[in-house]
Structure formats: C-alpha cells, structure tokens
Amino acid sequence: MSGILAILVVDDNPSMARTLADILDVKGFEVHAAYSGAEALEILRNQRVDILLTDVRMPDMNGVALYREARKTRPNLTTVLMTAYAADDIIQQGIAEGIKTVLNKPLDMDFVLSLFSAYKRLIIKEAL
Amino acid sequence: MTWQTILYFTSILITCGLTGFLAWYAWRQPALPGVRTYAVLALCECLMALTEFLSMVSGTQAQALFWFNLRFIFTALIPVLFLAFALAYGGHQNWLSKKLLAGALVIPVITQVMLWSNSLHGLWVKHEIGFHQNGSLWIADTGLRLPGLWFMVHSFYSLILLLAGIVVILLTAWRMRRQHRGQALLLAGGALVALGTSLVPVFNLLPHAGFNPFIPGIGISAILYALAIFRFQFLKKMPGVEEGASAKQPEDPGKRSLAVFIFIFFLFASAIAAIGYVSYQNYKSQFRLQMENQLTAIANLKVNGLQLWRSERLGDGTLLGNNAVFAGLVKSYYENPQDAQPRAEIQAWLENYLHVYNQYDQVRLLDTQGDTRLSAPAGLPSLSPAVIQFIPTVLQSGKVTLEDFYREEADQRVYLTVLVPILDPAAGDRIIGLISLRIDPTFYLYPNINQWPTSSTTAETLLVQREGDAVFYLNELRFEQNAALNLRFPLADTQVLAVKAVLGQTGVVQGVDYRGVAVVGAVGPVPGSPWFLVARMDISEVYAPLTARLWQTVLFFGVLILAAATGLALVWRQQRVRYYRAQAETAAALRDSEIRYRRLFEAARDGILILDAETGVVMDVNPFLIEMLGFPQEEIYGKELWELGFFKDIAANKANFLELQQKEYIRYEGLPMETADGRSIQVEIVSHVYQVDHHKVIQCNIRDITERIAAEQKLAEYSSQLEEMVEARTRQLRETQEKLIRQERLATLGQVAGSIGHELRNPLGVISNAIYFLKMAQPDAGATIKEYLDIIENETRASDKFITELLDFTRIKAVEREPVPVSELVRQTLERYPAPPSVEVTLAIPPDLPPVYADPHHVVQVLGNLTVNACQSMDKGGKLTISALAQGDMIRIAVQDTGVGIPPENMSKIFEPLFTTKIKGIGLGLTVSQKLAEANGGRIEVQSQPGKGSTFTLYLPVYKESV
C-alpha cells in the first residue's frame, strides 16, 4: 500500500468527471475517471480504488446501485455521492445502506479536498 | 176638433212614446229572466199605439180601418207575451217550453187569418167598426162592431191569458212578502188597468163614450210599469232571479198542487162558462133578430095582402059601376020592371059576381033609396040598415065605397059590403042605382089573415081599428070566440099590442095580447084603410127554441167543465201518483244510501263522531272511535262535546265549538287526546257541518296519527342529520379538492424547478471545478485574470444560491415538529432575515406565551418570508410590528407593516403560485409559506388596507403536554 489514495470519479457528464479528476490529480491523488456505472465497475475490478466519488443520477446505473455492485467485491470501499438534488429518494436509500457522505453540486472543492485528506489519514491508519 | 179629441190624441202619442222608451230601457238592462220579454211586450204596446195614431191621421176611412185592424197583431201577441213575462217574473221560466209557447201562439195566428179574410166568412166581425171624423182625425166607433165568433174567441183567450198573468204576478207578490211586493203590485195593477180598458170595446160597455179607452189604458199601465221600474227597481231586482238561483227543495205537491189545479180548473171553468154564455147570448140575439125579421116579414105580407084585397074589391065594384052596358040594362029595368030580358040579364050579372069572385055572399041591385030590386041569390030580404045608412054618402060621392066590418042584425055575423054607384053615362053620369056586394070575411078574408106561413101554436095576425078611445078587433081570434067587433080595449092599456099599433108604433114591439099573455109582434097600419095589423106570437113560443138552446148550452158547457175537471183531476192524480212513486223510489234510494253509508260509517278506519250542530250533543259514534279510545258507548252517546273526557283538551270551552259551528270546516292536526287506559295519543280532527232534514249536524273524523307524527319526527331528524353530513362531506371534499389543486400545481412547479435546478447545477459544478483548477494551476496569472476568475466564481455561487432557494421553496422537507417558544422563532427569523435600517421593528410577544408545536425551520422560513415581504412593501421606511398572543388552542403571530397594502382585486390571488407584484421574484413565497403553515397544523390569514399597510397572521397550534 503506497501512501497515495486512489479515487474513482464517476459522472455521466464527461466535463465534470474530467475537471474533478484533473483537480484531484494535481492535488496528489491517484485518480480514475469513469463516465458510466459499467465503466466504473470495470475499473474497480482491475484497479486499486480507495474512494468511490460518484454522481447519483446516471443513465445506465445510478450511484447507489453502483455502490451496491461495488460492495459485492469491495465491501470496505468508501463511497461519496454527488448530486444536484437536495432531496432524493435514492440518496436516502444510499444513506440507509451505509453511505456516509453526500455532496451537493456544485462541489465546494476546498471542502472536498480536506474531506479526502481526512479519509487518507483514516484509510492509512486502518491499513496499518 | 173638440178638446176631448185633442186629449185622446195626446194620450195616444204619450202612450206611444212612453212604451217605446220602456222597451228601449228594458232592452238595455241585463238579461234577467223576463226582462227581454218585457222589452218585447213594451215594444208591441208602442207599435199598437203607433197603429192607433196612424189610423187617426189616415187620409181615408179605408186606410183608417186598415191601421185599426193592423193593431190586432199586437193585441193578439201581447197577452201571450204578458203571460210569458209573468211566468219568468215569478221564476217559472222553465214552465214555458218552446212547444208551449208555439201552442199559445196558434190562436193569435188564426186571429190574423180570420181578421184579414173576414169578408169570406164573417167569423171575425159581422159588422165592422165605424169611424167618424173629428177635425181631420178619424175616431173609431167600436159600438158599431158586431163581433163574430172568432172575435169572441180571441177576446176571451186574451183575457184569460192576461188574467192568468196577473194571478201569477199577484201570487209572486204574495209569496215575496215584503221584498218585491211594491213592484209586483204595480205590475199587476198596470195589467189590470190594461185588461179593464180592453173590456170596454169588446163588450161595448160604454156605448156613448165616443172614444176607445183601450190605448190610453195601455198608457196608464205603462206609467205604472215605469213607476215599478224607477221606484221599485223592477228589471234590476226581480223575484224570478232569486227563485231561479235557489234550487227549490222538492216539496209535497199535495195541497199546493191541488190549489194550483183548483185554480186552473176555475180558470178553465170560468173561461168555458164565459164562452158558453157569450155563445148563448150571441145565439139569442141572432135568434131574436131572425124572429123579428120573420114577424116583420109576415106583417108586411099581410098588410100587402089586405091592401091588394081592398083594391080588388073596389075594382070589382068599379067594373060594374062604370059599365055602360050594365047601366043601360039597369035603366031599362027600372023603366020597365016587367020586361023580362033586362031583368034576366041583370040577374045573370049578379049571379056571376056571386060565383066568379067567391068573395061575396049577397049581391043586390038597389035603387037610390036603398031598396033591394034584384038580388043573388034571388029573393033576399032588404038590405041591412047598417049599410043603408051609408047610401046617401055614396050617392053624394059617386064613388065605390067599402063599408067596414059591421054586424048583421039578422044573423049577428060580421060582414063587409062594397057599395057601387051605377053611373049612367048617357045621362051625364047620373046615379041610377046601386050595387051592394056583401062580403063574408069568413070566406076569404079571415082565413087569409089568420093564415100563418110557418107552423106555430100561438102566432096570429090581428086586424084592429081605433074607434074613439078604444081599439077594436076586426077579425076572429085564435084564442077567443066571437071577438070580431066585440072585443075592445081602451087606449090606456098601452101594454096591449093592438093599442100600441093604433097609437102609431111600427116595427117589432113587445107587449101583451088580449089574453094578457106576453107576446112579441110586428105592428103597422094598413095603408088606405083605418085598419092596423098586428102579427104576433107568444114570447114563450118565440123563445122556446132559445130556452132549448139555453139548456143545450148549459148541458154542453157543463159537460165540458166536467170534462175539464175530470181531466185536471186525472192529471192531478197522476202527478200525485208520480210524486208518491218518486217519493217511494227516493225513500228506497235513501234507504240503500243509508245502508251504504251506515256500513261505511261502521267499517271506517277513522273514528267518526256525529254531533248536533246546535247543542253539541253526540248523536252517533262509530265502532272504530270506541275501539280507538276505549270508552264504552254509553259514555259518549248523548253527551255534550265538552263533557267528553277525551275531548276536554280540544273542546274545553264552547268557543271552540262556536268556531266549528261558524266555519263549517275545520281541520286540526296533532291534537293530544287521552284514551280510556290513560294512553296519550295524537289525533287529526276534520270537521264538516252539513244539513240533515233541516237540521245541522257536525261530523268529526278523528284519526290516530301518533305513529305518523313519530315517524315524521324521526324522518325530520334523519333528514337534518343527513343534511349536516352532506354539508360536512361537501366541505371536506371542497377543501381536499382545493388542496389537491394546489398540490398539483406545486408538484408541477417542483418538477419544473427541480429539473431546471438539476440541469443548471451540473454545468455550474463543472464551471466551478474549472475555475478551481485554473486558479490552482495558474497561481502566477496576472491580476486581471485572477479578478475575472473571481468574478466568474462569484456569479457561479450566486446562481447556485438562487437555485438552492428555488428548490427550497418547492420542496417541503420532512416535518419535524417540536415545542418552540415564539420569541425564539422570531429572534432566529430577524437574525436570518434582518430588516433594513429604514424599518422600525417592534416586538410584542408576551413572556408567558405557551410554546407552539411546529417545525422551527419551517416557522422561521415562513416568518422570514413574511418579514421580507413586509420590509419590501415599505421601501421608503415604516414600522414593522411582530406580535403574538394565544387564542384558544392556537397561537397567532401577526406581522404588521405600514406599507403600500394590497389592492382588493389581488387579495384572492396572493397565495396562488407564481403570483407576484415584485420586479424581482418568482411568486412562490406566500404559496410556500401557506403550505408550510398547513403542514404544521396552522394557516395564514391576511388583512390589508391599500395605502395603510397589511397584517399577515400566522396561526400555529399551542403545544400541549399530551400531544
């Protein structure tokens, strides 16, 4: 386990996925970008991913469904949801199933980076 | 023209005018029974007066007669019309069928035919009326009229009809007592005047009056009628009207009908008797006329016969006296009486007279001394001294002379003798002798006189002669032997027909005869003689056929009256029978009806009580009522209404009963009544008053409606409950519907807003990420670039904030109610939505106010919205007052401003979504606020005065421990 946190960014909007990935990459995270649920699962199978940052509403698979699929192979995967909708049944469902964090779009990037830094410390501590 | 004529003429004109006016006036009145008939009647009177007028002013007598006769159209019609009028007047117009009327008009029609065809048969009049002219006016003289049979029929018919009409009117007046008596008496009086004056010309009662009072009588009658009209309201209020209006009760025809029949009988009887009397009188006068004619004719015949006979006798004499041959014979006989030839020839002459003429019984040749020289039969004794005494007179006059009746002393018989002087033409008509022709009246004269052309037991002809102060009978009499020249009467016995004759009376006279028996005879002188002739008969014989006729008439008309009586009696009896039959039928029908109604009464499922309407005593009660109330019959029968226990509440006093008596129909519903077992029931009572046998009774139908009333009450309750339920449900539905509509609108709005937010937030997120990356990647960029990156970042944030607000308003987050103090909520609100400095904020929140039970986030959002709105309405400054107080189990929090207020037309729209008066604003604030208040069990109310400010009041429930 290296000291670098691997983050998978999933958004059906390529610009969103791309800008997020670029910012996180510059800030020193290992970043993978996916533009659909299926693409994200493919990456999860082949790569190391510590944090899953996914949009909720996507065409093929919503964020919570993706979280459920991901947990089948990676039960301890930390998942963060991004949404443009404040109140969403799917989000409520996700919270009920163990998702801890939901971020509203547009993302407050300073808050996101400090959150991920905190995760990095937590994850490394657990790994140790 | 005399003043009487002027008066008469004036009265005709007045009558014409007055009756014409009455006809016109009556015709214009409402057509009550009899009014139209009276109008026609008056018109007929008017026309009749008119014909009289036209008759008077006619040019010729023939025209006058024509107009006079024309009036009989009306005199024939008027009685019929009058009777019709009288019947209608008395209310009996139904008696007068069309057939009857047509029948009554038969005689008037025949009258017209008779009148105008009188010249063919003389049944109308035997002698027409006459006219005399007064000035230029023709005055009829009805005294000259000799009425025919039909005239009498017409007259009596008219009189009977008029009388009947008068009787009807008088009966009506009597029946009406006071009410119409005045007018009825006037009407009857008027008719009587007309009737009376019409009798005058018909019976020639005033032969010397000179004027016919008939038309003036009509005029007086019309005045009486006018009085009845204008003083007693005749034609306007009449008995017939009321009679017709009130249906008469059928009554026993017994006495009343009998009286009518007796009346009709007397009418018939007097009519028949009158016709009989008139027919007899007519016959009598006819007969008398005939007898008088007969007597006169016989008398004339006898007188002529006597005259002829006398002249014949004188002629017989002249034949010998002026005979030259005979004179020559007589002369030669006187000169030489012994010469047989002249003597024989003279004898032959004398014999010849004796036998040929059959008049003479002795013929003598006398010398101038009166000695008989020759005679036939031969050898007669000397001439009677009664004759001889006349010889000197004859010798002196030289004329043939008839010596009247004398009695021969020798045989005491009556003879007449013709003395004929024998003139000798050769000696200058010197009388040389005389011939006497003695006549035995019994040969020819007496039989001839006594002979009567018709068979008669008392008739005879008398020859009488006056001698001094007495009258002699010259011939032998039928009833007295040897009367000739023996019987005499003094002239003082003027009743004796013979006396009347010699005193110069002629024509038919009545008197007594020589026997003192009443006789009638024609008397007159025999011209050329001192004789008077009397042709007479005993009155008893003359009128014997008349007496027979009288008995016949009496018998015939008696039988007729009897027949009428029988007929009427039969009709009357039949009517009685019909009446009793009808009565029996009615009684039977009544009995049936009684049974039917008794059954109905007893089987009725209503209680029925029959009361005496006068006294209130119970007359009858049906079993159902007894069953219903449980009282025994004896307790009900015969009691007065207010004595009945169960009735005491209803008929407690007589006032109620009086009301019942007066109103005749009363219906009470829901009256309480107590039954025998103390049960209280409610009843419906329907009461009728009606007449039974001239007696008023009250029928009360009593129906137990206790159950019905209970059912009705229950029904009413159900009904009102149902109404309430329906109302509540309707309100609920309406509220739900309003809520649904509102929610639907909001849901739509939320969807739209949500999708816009979503669509905008993603690009905003990307922009925001991009800026972040640029700032991070280019820390050394120029100041201007950094500034522009900041501008983009700020606007992105502003957009995001706007979207967040939008999404907040459209989305109710989960309600999490909790007890919160109002002061805390207000504080938070003013902290989050501070008022601008120009607005002065005042708080009025009591410290002991209980907390509300609501979601504080929602309340703050609502109050914030209200505060922001209030401040925005006061952009030039003002006062904001937030006050709170408890009201029941609600807390009301009022946010009051002094701003521009809300125009009335907007008051209903301000809670609707997307309604806004702000330049910047999407019109969701109040909608969401109301929605939030409702979600927390409260509501928002608003009051506003444009220009003075608005007050928004938020009601929220008080927190209670139990909640």
Image (cartoon, coloured by chain):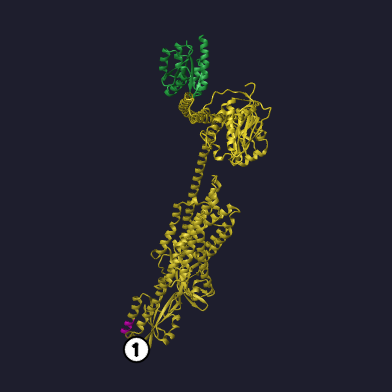
Name above or below for residue B130 compared with residue B909.
Answer: below
**Which residues, given as a range, are shown in magenta?**
B337-346
Label 1 amino acid?
Answer: Pro
Name above or below for residue B500 compared with residue A40.
Answer: below
Quarter location, residue B953:
top right
Drawing shade for chain B: yellow
> Circle 1 sits in a helix, a strand or a loop, which is it?
helix
The residue nearer to you, when weighing B152 against B388, is: B152
Can residue A52 be seen in this snapshot?
A: yes
**Residue B417 at x, y = what percent?**
41, 79
Quarter location, residue B356:
bottom left
- Image side of residue B494 versus residue B958, left or right: left
Name above or below for residue B864 compared with residue B575.
Answer: above
In reply to whether residue B528 is colored magenta, the answer given is no
- Image side of residue B612 versus residue B488, left or right: right
Residue extending farthest to the bottom is B427
Find disc 1 in the rendering and name its residue.
Answer: B425
The residue nearer to you, when weighing B814 against B284, is: B814
**Residue B578 at x, y = what percent?**
49, 43
Chain of the residue on which disc 1 is drawn:
B
Drawing shade for chain A: green
The residue nearer to you, when weighing B714 against B607, is: B714
**Residue B225 at x, y = what percent?**
55, 60
Residue extending farthest to the top is A128
Name above or below for residue B573 compared with residue B432.
Answer: above
- Point 52% across, 39% down: residue: B586
Can residue B889 be seen in this snapshot?
A: no
Badge 1: how crowded within 10 Å, few (<14), some, or many (20+)? some
Quarter of the image with the C terminus of chain B in it: top right
